[in-house]
Image (spheres, grey):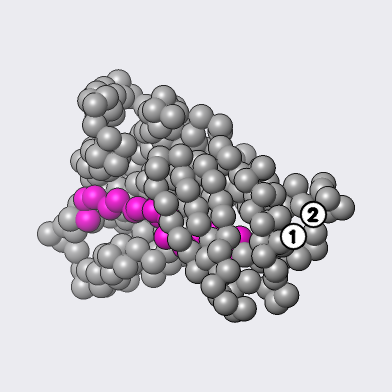
Amino acid sequence: MSKTPPQYAEMNERSREVFRRVVEGYLETGAPVGSRTLTRTLSEQVSAATIRNVMQDLEHLGLLGSPHTSAGRVPTQIGLRMFVDGILEVGDVNGEDRQTIDQTFGNKEQDVTTLLDRVGSALSGMTRGASLVLTPKQEAPIKHIDFVSLSRERALVVLVFADGRVENRLFTPPTGQTPSSMREAANFLNAIAEGHTLSELGAVITREIAARRLEIDSLAAELVESGFATWENEGETTERLIVRGRGNLLSENESETDLERIRSLFDDLERKRDIAQFLELAEGGDGVRIFIGSENKLFSLSGSSLVVSPYMNANQKIIGAVGVIGPTRLNYGRIVPIVNYTAQLVGKMIADRT
């Protein structure tokens, strides 16, 4: 995790211990923690009145909150973030969890999508949260590209892939294109495209046109640049977001507010309209990332926490992600290593199959 936040460093030892025990008690039970409870667990023998004064100070700092129904305190979103960043100790995945995850990958004969579906089910079962697994795009390298002019305003690009698939995609070519410029554009693309997938080709095109600007006709260069932007994403097999364990987010004691929050989350998951953003969240940092409450841009209305980690292919390119979503009182110390270890195994599994 990241280093200790400044406000934590400014607190005295008593305040730190009270804060830590309030957060740990809340994460364990989901209930507010009162001063009388803390008098039985603090290493220093102090009165309940003294503890209440410390808790009030922490509340003024915005680290603790006081629900109307209880005299106890719960951590605020700011408090949870400070705990996760500066206090939480994350070790390796424990032996029992490691064994469960390893067994999930035991059947090497299953295809990638089936295995990732099993991974999602295992994650939700182990964490008692909802699991999210973003599968990689299924892309084959390009074997050949050709252009066919249909009219002044319509053209066809013919894409032949290494797996034998052929796709024809309509697009509007730049003004002034001629048969010779189309042939030159196709020859240029075929010289650089073989072995690359469509998603990889964009960067190659930009680099090669810049390096060979004097060798390629301006009309052909314009066709390649503008045409590729139009048809690179059409018809590709896109990522799939596997969601398992929605029912784990429900319990018998949910308040009406919590139920509405969870219904909102279910609605977000059903629409799955922010798949790309889910991957962006995972790509935003090294290893596991934790989003608490409104920090979670993907499910900002749900009041939930998301623990997510990307996974990479054999070329160390991020191609997908795994995560767990649940209430803000997730057992972060256990779930973070589970998500991290699972992401590593998914990446290795995919790398071994390519």
Q: Which residues make up the magenta segment? A: 228-246
200 and 272: which one is in front?
Answer: 200
Q: Nearer the viewer, residue 73 or 114?
A: 114
Asked which quadrant contains residue 138, the reply is top left
Residue 238 colored magenta? yes
Task: Identify the image quadrant of residue 193.
Answer: top right
Q: Nearer the viewer, residue 55 or 201?
A: 201
User: Which residue in the structure is indicated by mark 2?
Assistant: 216
Kind of element beneath mark 2: loop
* Residue located 58% across and 69% down the image: 149
* Relative height, residue 99 to residue 80 (above, below): above
- Would residue 29 be seen by someone viewing this image from the given angle? no
Q: Up-down: is 184 above or below 299?
A: above
Query: Residue 31: x percent and y percent?
Result: 28, 55
Find residue 221 and name its label: 1
Q: Amino acid at mark 1?
A: Ala
Q: Is residue 129 magenta?
A: no
Alpha carbon distance from label 2 to label 1: 6 Å
Say whether residue 183 is left or right of residue 63: right
